Image (cartoon, rainbow, N blue to C red):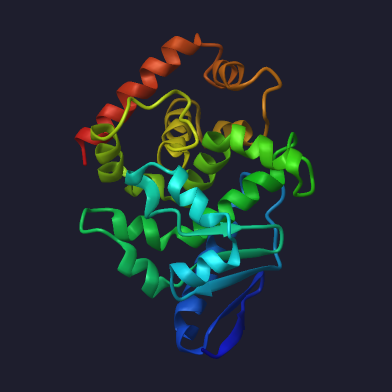
Amino acid sequence: MAWVESASPSFRARHDSAHERDAERVLDSLERLRDQLYRLFPRTPEGITVVLHDGPISLSLSNPMLPLKWLATAPAARRYVAGWVGSEELHVLAPSALASRASNVPGSRAMLALSAAALYARRVVGENNHDLPGRFSPARARLELRWAWLLEGAGRWFSGQTEHSRPAIARRLREGRRPSFPPGIRDAPLLGGTVIDLLAREEGEEAAAQFASRLHPQGARAALSKAFGGRPFVHTEGAWRSHLARLASAS
């Protein structure tokens, strides 16, 4: 495989020479997303290199923790864990590999096509969150696990992935235990975005961006009560479960 580089005003891509057009499309999509996120977040990082991988083996070799993340994710969401993002690089499956990973249900291909966008949006959320340590560290990793439903969910919602997730949500509700609220680590990639979706519907997109930019010192319950206008946690949980049921029934 011959690795080459492509560039756009704000990003670079490293990829197989056969994927040049795919790389250009990925970079164009990231430029558009960066412009959209700039309206909501003060900092939208540039200079990130997007590495496009031909398949899961190559992707896993770039980050040995990724297979563990796949295993820790609910089966309904596993195929949508298609990359990872660090401070300077974003690693993701190439578009052809993402298309091969898609299932036959509506929305699957669209969700996977937005994988690079979701990872970049997740990076923007982390960059703008005032309560995350500035550098990647064990302390930051612990916070990111604790707040995965918020950070991961915001990245996927602001990228547009959650909009296409209804069939996957319906599958998740049929399988396994009743999801917790807020979603646990296994459900964060799929259901985290539905919490942001509910907030955006009720309070607006700017409120969702502000919510993603802080980690309440008293934890998730306090954060959710504050975000939803002081509404008791139990009532917000009920609204979220009703929202999940509506999404699943419309799939």
Q: Position of residue 111 (x, y in %)?
A: 37, 55
Q: At 67% across and 37% down in the image, what residue appears?
A: 142
- Seen in the picture, residue 34 relative to 27 is either above or below; the reply is above
Q: Position of residue 187 (x, y in %)?
A: 43, 37
122 lies above or below 52? above
Residue 246 in view in this figure: yes
**Viewer-closest of 207 and 135:** 135
Across the whole image, how many numbered discs are drawn on residues? Answer: 0
In the rendered image, residue 248, in percent from the top left (x then y), is placed at: 25, 35
Residue 21 in percent (x, y) is at: 46, 83
Q: Quadrant of residue 198?
A: top left
Where residue 229 sits, quadrant-wise, is top right
Instruction: Kindly indicate the quadrant of the structure image that contains residue 34.
Output: bottom right
Specify the quadrant that holds the C terminus: top left
The residue located at (46%, 59%) in the rendering is 82
Vertical side of 215 occupied by 123: above or below: below
Left or right position of 127 against 105: right
Q: In the current view of this chain or complex, which residue is farthest to the right? A: 134
**Residue 197 vs residue 217, the one in the foreground:** 217
**Residue at horizontal 52 percent and vertical 64 percent from the top:** 60
Residue 28 visible (yes or no): no
In this orientation, which residue lies closer to the viewer: 242 or 187?
187
Q: Is residue 211 above or below residue 127?
A: above
Does residue 22 appear left or right of residue 35 in this picture? left
